[in-house]
Amino acid sequence: MIFLWFKLVKYMFYIYNVSTNYNLIQLKKFKYLLIFLCLANVSVFAQTEEEIFEEVFANPKSLELNFKLARFQLKNGNFKGAAASLERILVRIPNETTAQLLLARVNIQLNNPTEAKRLYELIIANANAPQENILQARRELGLADQEIADQSPWSFSGYASVGWGKKDNARAASVNNEVLYLDSIYTNDIMDEPEYFRQGTLGLNLIRDMGNNNRFLSNLILNDRSYGSSYKEGRNQSYSLGLGLDYEMLGGFTKLMASGGEMHLAKQNFIGFYGMDLEHRRVLAPNLLLNFGINATKNDFRHYDGIADNNDKSGWVHKAYVGLTKSWKKFRGNIGYISSRTSAKEDFYSYKGDQLNISLTTSYGPGSTTIFKSVIKNNYEEANTTIANHERRDIVNSYGINWSMGLKKWDIPEQGEPTINILIRQGSSFSNIANYKRPDEKEWMISLSQTF
């Protein structure tokens, strides 16, 4: 359409060259009118990715609209978005070779040559595919093979972050400093005071591609949190190491991880732990992911100066969990439930727990914003008679907001981009025993992180 407009303008320029002075004046006016119409035409037909996505969302079965969105995303370098659009097409039409060809090219861009090769081979093996697509797939298959040959099966990644913040009631003082002992209320000298803190975290991941979408996983996480000068004993340092396998099986992916680590509190060894986790993930429907699993962890509380019965809390924690993740438009919702059973050396430290986690993430506005809510309910099995003659019951509520933004594109953080993160959290602990009642607790933290 725009091309025809400019051809018409060119023709008018020709007339202009042979026109009289009177016609010259008129044609100049007409020329400006045509140029205005051309510019207007461009503005009318130009669409943003969000506008095209809205059309796809209103009519997700439209092959034409999904291709339109994918090509727009490819043109603008949004390869992950283009991959999602093309995969939607292939969910409805599995052997659509044009979508397969474009998706193979996208996977080359996303450094997934193995998946690109699989798609090229599907096109070549499809007797009903258009001949030009088969020829193109054969030409590009060599590129995928070369990428695979050049690609090491090992990949390394990680992240580092530093943060500063403030935590109210950092010493976990009870409401009004009240404690229960032998069914009598006393007041202790632990004050409900806020503390400023610094926190640093380093995470390292080493992964080996084992072929057929199977992977060997390993990770190391180091963390250090230091409080203000008035709360030196609150400093804690921890590390954890994990090794595992992620296999494509049972219509999804199954991950088995073994992990262990320690936490030091005020430079003393406070707790060590080790355990196993078995998780299965699968896609139930477009943009709907299910995950469920079981976990067993042994907590070994050390003998610790100032906490006489710390070692009595040692024991196994068994968990079963299930979660759902749903994505739509610019939102992602998560809901998860965890059922747990803690078996400690002393029965009055053993309890059954239930936990519900809900979060909603949106990319509206600059960056990414998540609001979250968590509720934990713990029912202890026996009474600690040195405190009270009835079993302990706790309910812990926490909620807050987390916002992050990449500092290069000033939008949703991407791999390799420095990121600013702001966390604001508030919570409260309710208990039928005064020692464990906590006033409303607030915490905020600003952190800077870098992935690599």
Image (cartoon, grey):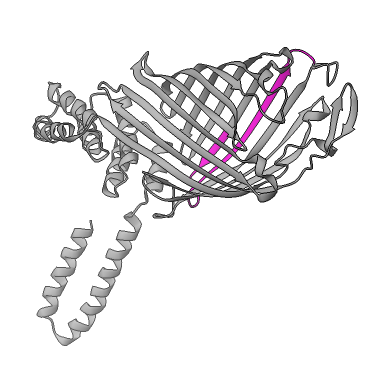
Residue 98 spot, x, y in % from top left: 20, 33
Main secondary structure found in the magenta portion: strand
Look at the image and tell me in which quarter the C terminus lies.
Answer: top left
Residue 30 spot, x, y in % from top left: 25, 74
Q: Nearer the viewer, residue 294 or 68?
A: 294
Residue 361 spot, x, y in % from top left: 52, 39
Question: Horizontal placement of 323 versus 142: left or right?
Answer: right
Region in magenta = 359-383
Q: Residue lying at the far right in this picture: please name it.
A: 184
Question: Horizontal placement of 451 versus 71: left or right?
Answer: right
Residue 117 colored in magenta in the image: no
- Seen in the picture, residue 305 relative to 321 is either above or below; the reply is below
Residue 362 spot, x, y in % from top left: 51, 42
Residue at image coords 32%, 37%: 66
Question: Horizontal placement of 233 versus 422: left or right?
Answer: right
Residue at image coords 26%, 69%: 35
Q: Is residue 364 visible?
A: no
Residue at image coords 70%, 21%: 378
Q: Is residue 144 visible?
A: yes
Q: Nearer the viewer, residue 390 or 253?
A: 390
Residue at image coords 37%, 16%: 251
Residue 368 colored in magenta in the image: yes
